[in-house]
Amino acid sequence: YHENERRIASASEGCFVFKPSSKKRKRTVGIDEYFVDGNDDCGNGRERFNICQKLWEKIKMDTEILQDELNEKILESLLDFIKKCTLSFQSRTDDWASRMRASEIPTAALVLGVNVPDHDMTFQSLSDLLKNSVTPFSVSVQAKECTALKNLMQRVLERLMGVGVSVEEDEEDSGIHLPQKRVSCSISVLCQWYKTVTKLSTHEFYRISSLSASKCLCSDITVMMLYQNFLIQCLLTTIFLNSRYIHELPLIFVFGIATSPSTVQHILPHSVSSLLCIELFQSLSCTQHLATVIDKLILTSQFPFKLTGKVLQVLVSIFLYHDFSVRNFVKGLQLALLEHFHSQPLSVLCCKKQEARHNAQKLSHKDVEMVRQLPSFMRYVETQEPQEQVQLLTSDDHVKEVCQMLLKGLRKYHKNYYPILRCLHSLTASLPKYPLGKQIRELHISCLEKNVWETNEYESAMQLLRLLAKDELVAALRKLTNYHVLSLGMSIETLSGEEITSPGKDLQKKTDLFQLQKTLLEMKGSRRTKKMSPFEILRNETLDFIDGLVRSHLTPPELQPLNEVCYYSSSGVLRRHLNATPRTSIQTALSHPFYFLQNENLKTDAGTVSSAAPDICIVYKLHLECGRLINLYDWLEAYATVVSAAEGKDPDAEDYGKVDELKQEVDIIHTFARFIQSVSELEFLGFVKSTKQKTDHVARLTWGGC
């Protein structure tokens, strides 16, 4: 709006909207400028942005690749299903059974789980794959787009035909071959268009469908993918109409189901469900999907950006207790990446080997001073000789050389950490009660926070490993050779050839926890007096070797020098970004509007009300001084007092009220209207509500300040 053009001379005039020109639009600040302007004390904001952008794109690309790999099995099953349906369409006969069977619509019920935010991405990926490799006539429709049958048919026609579609049924059906014209919305139009397109020559058909003849498996089949939560009546009508036109329009449904396959039978009557030939397809669970993402993106030494245990726990907790969305988990990971590179100037060293060495050589004097202030680097300096300490505290060139050496050591630490972590998880995951965590992420979080070998769970796990039977121990050790970190070939063969029976062979027969603990204590005491067999000696040597690897390579990363350059640890900041708290934010805005409006006149002392604050802020502050029931008249009087102070009126002055009566009445009505509007806004936000106890009172719904 232009303020100079909004002058209203009388009540008969109106208020007009003037769109500002594109030249006067406020320029938005990009992420690269956010890096440079927001936190560029060291002058390396551009380099940090470039590194962050590369890692961001890598996360996005790797996630898409994982999504395609996880959907590959489902797609193969759907392809087989569509092939089978194609053969059934082509092999129709005139007998009664075939005609009855031909009226059924082949339907694939795809159970995706309750991770609702990921359904859009999954269906879009499946739709694209179907269009590229199965049939060009594939359309994906969401429930929120189709509130009625007309809307559903409009979306289907638009996405299949690629033309504008009118929802008016009385329009002419002509012009369906001309994309510049709109066509009417009906299933008969779709059937006519389908007949016209399928009559085209092979060359013309593949030219308009952007497919090659070798890739298109069944070009004469239409696949319609529908989401869950469709309106029942709309879905019933869609199934009924399409079953009547199935002879003219070969159609396959793909239903997305979030909860249970029985949902289809529950929401559809038998007269409609009998028109569907349903086959069930089960997708990978969201927890398995998350485990794959963590394994490929986080538990790898190839990705330089790392998360501390608390940050990873925040992301996992949000996933498990909020939405089960892997997509949102990846967004949280990207947000942590952005926050780390923006808040940590030394994150310029969080990159690949050659680039990190080059950036370490270019560190400025301010960068070197920041390196010296890092807690991990200060601990490293304290462990050095006095002469070396002087060099580290005075020579910038020496610090740059040491930084390159420490970064190399940090990469070596990560290169050894993850294989040993997988080995320990492989050994202990199948033990009773999963003492070190059923999921590898649980063991990883434990190793990030403390020395895992100092925990009671680790000690119990090693005791159980020393009491395993020969076959179980050999089978567990054979899995470790896949990680290429243990040279246990000779030990495994020796254990396999040992004929002496393990003393823990009968442990698996005892399922009672008390009996198991009693047996372990007895065996522990007997080992002190009984001479160990060759099997026991070799087993202890092998497990001692594994224990030594754990103690050497699974130390917490905070003990590594320069760990701050690649580890993001601000779990509180990440939680505030991801866990929305609207009530707290609203209370903060109403109590302290200065922080949102940035107006110096709104600054007040604690517990006071600014007369220049917005009306809703004044009403909110006054309602905090009331009890469970608020008298509206008293509330209005207090509000009028504050507002009159804002207008420069002194209620105690002698001439107060000695004004024109008409103007005074207008001011009273205006004040009352503003008060009623503010109270209505508070009621809409859920702070107060009407009560039947007293007609001139409202009930307060919230207690406690921000």
Image (spheres, helix red, strand yellow):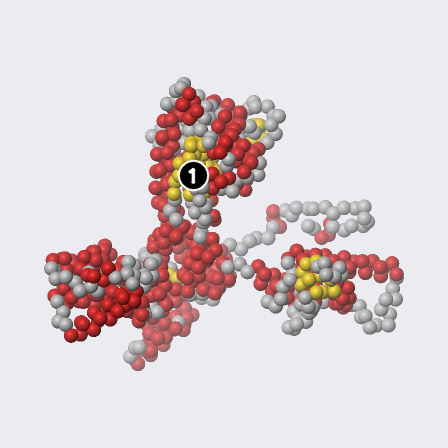
Query: Which residue is depicted at the point 42% across and 43% down?
Result: 111
Query: Which residue is depicted at the point 82% across and 73% down?
Result: 652
Q: Looking at the image, is 100 positioned above or below residue 620? A: above
- Of residues 61 and 421, the one nearer the viewer is 421
For the C terminus, give its image quadrant: bottom right
- Left or right relative to 411: residue 324: right
| Residue 688 visible to an observer of this rendering | yes
Query: Which residue is depicted at the point 72% across and 61% down?
Result: 693
- Of residues 134 and 359, the one nearer the viewer is 134
Disc 1 target residue:
109
Within the image, what quadrant is residue 180 found in?
top right
- Left or right relative to 464: residue 210: right
Q: Position of residue 291 (x, y in %)?
A: 36, 54
Q: Position of residue 52 (x, y in %)?
A: 42, 57
Identify which amino acid the numbered label 1 is placed on.
Ala
The secondary element bearing badge 1 is classed as strand
Q: Looking at the image, is 255 positioned above or below residue 655? A: above
| Residue 553 visible to an observer of this rendering | no
Residue neighbourhood size for the residue with mark 1, other residues' Cα within 10 Å, grouped as few (<14), some (14–19), many (≥20) = many
